[in-house]
Every structure is written in structure tokens, then in C-alpha cells.
Image: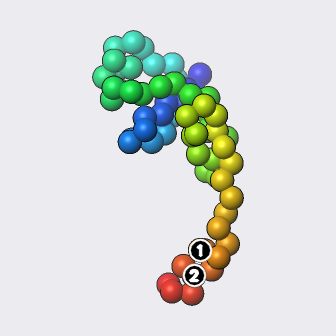
Amino acid sequence: MEKGFYHNTRGYWQTNDSVNDHVIAAYPKGTVEVPLKPSADHEWDGVNWAEVGIDIEFLSNEVRHS
């Protein structure tokens, strides 16, 4: 069973299976188990996954300057 974890400075990661307590104890202090991230367009807001909008203007500028 996949599990998701989040740390405020390290970000999100996901495991492919259950994780034993020994491994979890080695995670950075402050790591919390979270629901699996729904998509790359979501960010953890401390309580839930929040969908973030795509900034079309920013992407357009990036393409123009590439």
C-alpha cells in the first residue's frame, strides 16, 4: 500500500509499500503522513492538498525566453 509523507522543507515523497517504524524514525523531524498527492498541480497546505492554478503568463514568458 502506497503512503505519502510531507516535510515543510523537504517537500512530499511517496513510498511504494507500508513503512516500518524503524524507517519512519529515520525521517526528518516534523515529517507527517499525508494522503497521496492527487496530481502535480496540488500543493500541501498543512491540512489538505490544494489545487494550484497554472500561471499561463509565466509559462508564456518562459517559452518566449527559451
Q: Is residue 24 left or right of residue 43?
A: left
In this rendering, the answer to whether 46 lies above or below 60 is: above
Q: Is residue 19 left or right of residue 37?
A: left
Q: Is residue 39 left or right of residue 6?
A: right
Q: Residue furthest top?
A: 21
In this rendering, the answer to whether 18 lies above or below 55 is: above
Give residue 62's quadrant in the image.
bottom right
Horizontal and vertical percent position of residue 38:
67, 41
Mark sitting on residue 58: 1
Mark yes or no: residue 39 visible: no
Q: Residues within 10 Å of mark 2 (few under 14, many from 20)?
A: few
Q: Residues within 10 Å of mark 1 (few under 14, many from 20)?
A: few
Horizontal and vertical percent position of residue 22:
34, 14
Q: Residue furthest front?
A: 46
Q: Quadrant of the N terminus?
A: top right
Residue that appears at 62% across and 80% down: 60
Give residue 50's quadrant in the image.
top right
